[in-house]
Amino acid sequence: MAEKDVQDQVNQTPEENSGVDINTDDNQSIGDSELEKLKAELDASKDKYVRLVAEFDNFRRRSAKERIETIQTAGREVIKDMLDVLDDSDRAQKQLDKSDDKQVQEGVSLVFNKLRNTLHSKGLKPMETIGKDFDADLHEAITEIPAPTEELKGKVVDEVVKGYYLNDKIIRHAKVVVGK
C-alpha cells in the first residue's frame, strides 16, 4: 500500500500535492518584491566593497608616501647639526685661500669638499639667494640697507647665514640682508 500512496503523490500536480491553492499572480508580486530587496542588498554590498577597496588603496598609497618621506628625512637632525660644521668649513676655507701654504690649502680643501659631497649625496642643497627677490618663506631678513642700484631694491644684497634644502624641503632658512 505504501507504493500506491507514493505513486498517487507523484501523479498529482504540485497544487494538489500541497493541498494549498496557489495563485501565480500573488507569487509573482511576492517574488518581485523579494528580488528587488535582494538586488538592493546586493547593490549596497557592492558599494560597500568598492568603498572598502578604495579606502584600503588610499591607505596603502599614504603609507608608502609616509615611508618614503621618513627614509628621505631619517638623518634630518644629524644633517641639521652638521650645517654649523659646514658653515665653519666655508669660513675656514676662505681664510685658507688667503694663506701661502698650498699643501695645507689642498689638503683641507679635499676634506671640506668630501664633507660637502657627502651631505649633497644625502639630499642637502644650498639655497641660491644673492640677487634673488626677497621671499619670506625662504629667507629671514636680518636687516635692510639702501640698495646699491635700483635693480637691487627688494632683492637679497648679502647672505649672512646660508640656507639649505633637504630633499627639496627647507631645513634652514637663509639669513639675508635686503636692499630697500
Image (cartoon, helix red, strand yellow):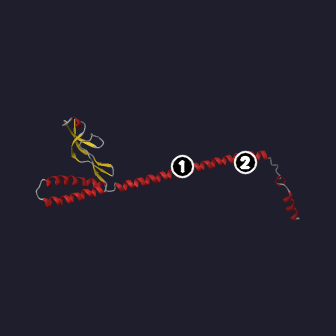
Observer-nearest residue: 160 or 26?
Answer: 160
Mark closer to the chain start, 2 or 1:
2
How many neighbours does mark 1 have within 10 angstroms: few (below 14), some (14-19), or many (20 or more)?
few
Residue type at the position of mark 1: Arg
Q: Residue 63 carries which label?
A: none
Q: Find numbered disc 2 in the image and state the secondary structure of the residue it sits on.
A: helix
Question: How busy is the neighbourhood of tag 2: few (under 14 within 10 Å), some, or many (20 plus)?
Answer: few
Residue 31, label in figure: 2
Q: Position of residue 143 (x, y in %)?
A: 21, 39
Which quadrant: the C terminus?
top left
Q: Is residue 103 above or below residue 25?
A: below
Q: Where is residue 137 in the image (x, y as percent from the top left)?
A: 30, 42
Q: Which of 25 and 172 is in front in this view?
A: 172
User: SS for tag 1?
Assistant: helix
Name the residue carrying label 1: 51
Q: What residue type is labelled 2?
A: Gly
Q: Which of the 4 quarters of the picture holds residue 156?
A: top left
Query: Which quadrant of the structure image shows residue 2?
Result: bottom right
| Residue closer to the observer: 161 or 120 | 120
Which quarter of the rendering shows the N terminus? bottom right
